[in-house]
Amino acid sequence: MLIIGTFEHCIELEQALAILEHSGIPREHILVVPMDTDPQPPIKLATKLGDRYSAAIEIGMACATGCSAMGTCFGFILTWGPIFWGLLAALIGFIIGFGLYLLVNKGAHRHLPKRLPEVTVIVQCPKEQSILVMETMWQYRVLTIGQTPEPS
């Protein structure tokens, strides 16, 4: 039979592997595969820092649009005209929206818990030992477990 379990990379994984080896399963019948949690640099997607600034730019642009409309309206009664006051109000609105967003969300990205990498363990054992293997894995905090009959 093939018993497949998924563990977090922690000391319990090492303990489970040691128990399995001591219970009579040869090391050659245990396959441990570490799983990737982050894409490689060539496939790099937008980072959390980039996401933070892109959201701040969106908020800044929204504030700039609103302030620009108000500045243009007031520019009709002020001395330098609607174009100047609309552009000045847009710049001020962008700075206020961008700055407020960064100020309010300055610590939001630091509170995310760091995920431990996962490890998949595949054990090939006789059907008689499958119960022992699964109990050992459950005892040492396996996340998920599955079994399949050995192919003929």
Image (cartoon, rainbow, N blue to C red):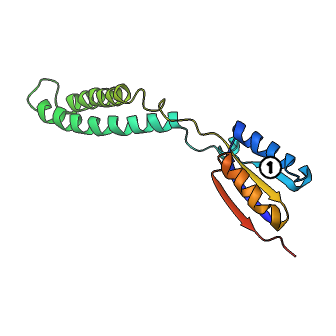
Residue 127 in percent (x, y) is at: 81, 67
| Residue 81 position (above or below residue 141) | above
Residue 69 in percent (x, y) is at: 19, 38
Pointer 1: residues within 10 angstroms few (<14), some, or many (20+)?
some
* In the image: residue 24, left or right of residue 131: right
Residue extending farthest to the left is: 77
What residue appears at the point 68 percent right and 45 percent down from the top-left corner?
140
Residue 97 in percent (x, y) is at: 30, 31
* In the image: residue 87, left or right of residue 50: left
Q: Quadrant of the C terminus?
A: bottom right
* In the image: residue 77, left or right of residue 94: left
Instruction: Give the camera-side residue of 134 and 77.
Output: 134
Q: Based on the displayed image, in which of its 4 quarters is residue 147 positioned?
A: bottom right
Instruction: Give the camera-side residue of 86 and 128.
Output: 128
- Check disc 1 and report its element: helix, strand or loop: strand
Number of numbered labels in the structure image: 1
Read off the residue under disc 1: 32
Q: Amino acid at mark 1?
A: Val
Instruction: Give the camera-side residue of 36 and 21.
Output: 21
Q: Based on the displayed image, in which of its 4 quarters is residue 57 positioned?
A: top left
| Residue 30 position (above or below residue 13) | below
Instruction: Give the camera-side residue of 88 and 62.
Output: 62
Residue 134 in percent (x, y) is at: 72, 57
What residue appears at the point 81 percent right and 61 percent down from the top-left corner?
129
Q: Quadrant of the N terminus?
A: bottom right
